Image: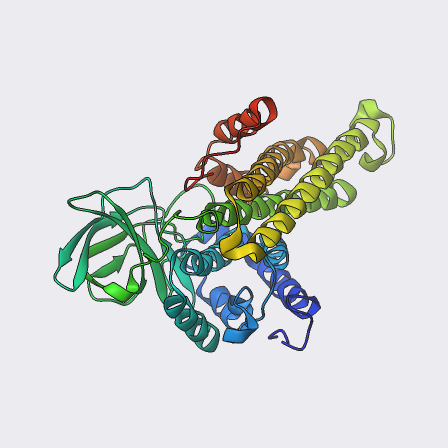
Amino acid sequence: MAPSRDDEPGQPGARQTAERLAAGFARTAAERDLKGGTPKAERDLLRASGLLALSIPAAYGGLGASWRTTLDIVRVLAAADSSLAHVFGFHHLMLATVRLFGAPAQWESWFERTARHQWFWGNALNPLDERTISRTRGAWREFSGQKSFCSGALDSQMLIASAHDAETRAFLIAAVPTQRSGISIADDWDNIGQRQTDSGTVTFEKVRIEDHEILADPGPLSTPFACLRPLVAQLVLTNVYLGIAEAAFNDARHYTLHEARPWPGAQVASTGDDPYILGQYGEFWIGLEAARVLADRAADRLDAAWARDAALTHAERGQVALATATAKVSAARTGLDLCTRMFDVAGARATHGALRLDRHWRNLRTHTLHDPLAYKIREIGEWALKQTCPTPGFYS
C-alpha cells in the first residue's frame, strides 16, 4: 500500500494510496464516530502507508510532495473520515512547524527519523492557552502546566509543545518525544464533532526540555517565511472543511437517488425529478466548485511562497494569507450550508440515528468555532477597501 518514490513527487502513487485508505476508513466512519476514542487501527494503516512522510523532502527519505498534493490528500481523507484527515493534516503541520521555526540541524534530523520510523507527530501548541510555563534550569528548560485542544497527541511519537517564559512571558515552542518523563495525555475529548481526533488535554509536570529541542532559530513568526506556518494550518482546515462538504454532498445524493420519496405535490415519479430538489443540488454544486477552485489556488500560492524560502517578502506572504482566508471562508460557508440543507433534499427518514448523517454538520461546526469566520472576513475587507494585508499571527 506504500506509495512509490519512483512517481513524480506527490503524484499518482500517493493519491491512489490515499484513495484506497479512504475507501476503508469510510466503511467504519459512522460507527467510529459513535464510539469516539483513538482510531488506533486506522492510524497504524496511515503509518504503514508511508504517507506520514508525504511532505518530507526526498533528500531526507520522504516523498517530496508539494503542499498542493499534501492538502489534496487531506481533502481525500476528510471526505471519508474528517477526524483522521484532521490528525493527518496536523501531523504535516507539525513537520512544517519545525521546518519554519527551527534550524536545519534540528529539522533535518527529525525529518530523517520521521521518514525512517513513520513517526506520528501530535499537537500541544495552543497559543490561546497560556497555562504552561517555562523556567530556565541551567542549560535546559522545564515546562509545567496544561494545554487544551491537543489534536493527535495520543498515539504520537513526537509533540510540538508551547509554553510562556515565567519571567519574560516570551512564547517558546519545542519539539519533544511524547514519551518524555512528565508528559501525560488525558483521554478527555468528548465533543459533539471530530470525535476521534483526541483533541484533549496534555499535562506537563516538570518536563525537561533540552536546548536543542527549542525552536528558536529563526523562532515563531519571526520572518515572512516563518509566518507561513499559520497559513499551512488554515489550509489544512480549509481542506478538511471541503472534504466534509463533499462527503455530505455524496451522502445526500445517494440518499436522494436511492431512498428519498417524492413529495406528493411535486407530481413527479422520482425525487430526482423534483425541480426544487434539482435547484438545491445546483446550488450545492456551485458552492463546492467555487470552494475547490479557491482552495487549490491558495495551495498553489503557498507552494510558490514556500519555494521562495528566506527570500519571501511580507507583501508576498500577505497575498498567500488573503488567498487562504478567502478559501477558508468559502469552504466553511459552503460546508455548513450543505451539511444543514442536505436533509432538505434527503427527507425526514434521512434523520434516522443509525445513518449518523448529522456527523458531517457536527464535525464541521466543531472545527469552525475555533477560528471565527467574522475575523477572516474583516481581514479580507481590510484588503478589499484599504489594500492592507493581514497582520501575521497564529490565526492569520
- Pinpoint residue 93: horizontal percent, then vertical percent: 47, 55
Q: Could you say where residue 184 lies in the image, as x and y percent from the top left?
A: 25, 59
Task: Point out residue 291 in the picture as x, y percentages from the top left corner.
Answer: 67, 40
55 left or right of 208?
Answer: right
In this view, the residue farthest toward the left is: 138
Residue 374 is left or right of residue 127, and the answer is right
Q: Quadrant of residue 393?
A: top left
218 or 351: which is nearer to us? 218
Q: Is residue 84 visible?
A: no
| In-front residue for pair 237/358 | 237
At 28% from the left and 67% from the top, the residue drawn is 179
Q: Is residue 372 or residue 352 the one in the foreground?
A: 372
Residue at x 58% of width, y 71% of height = 63
* Residue 233, above or below 100: above
Check the picture and name the quadrant holding the N terminus: bottom right
Q: Look at the image and name its color scheme.
A: rainbow
Q: Is residue 254 left or right of residue 103?
A: right
Q: Is residue 356 left or right of residue 189?
A: right
Q: Residue at x 48, y 51 (%)?
A: 225
Query: Residue 241: x and y, percent?
Result: 57, 43
Residue 295 visible somewhere in the drawing: yes
How many numbered callouts? Answer: 0
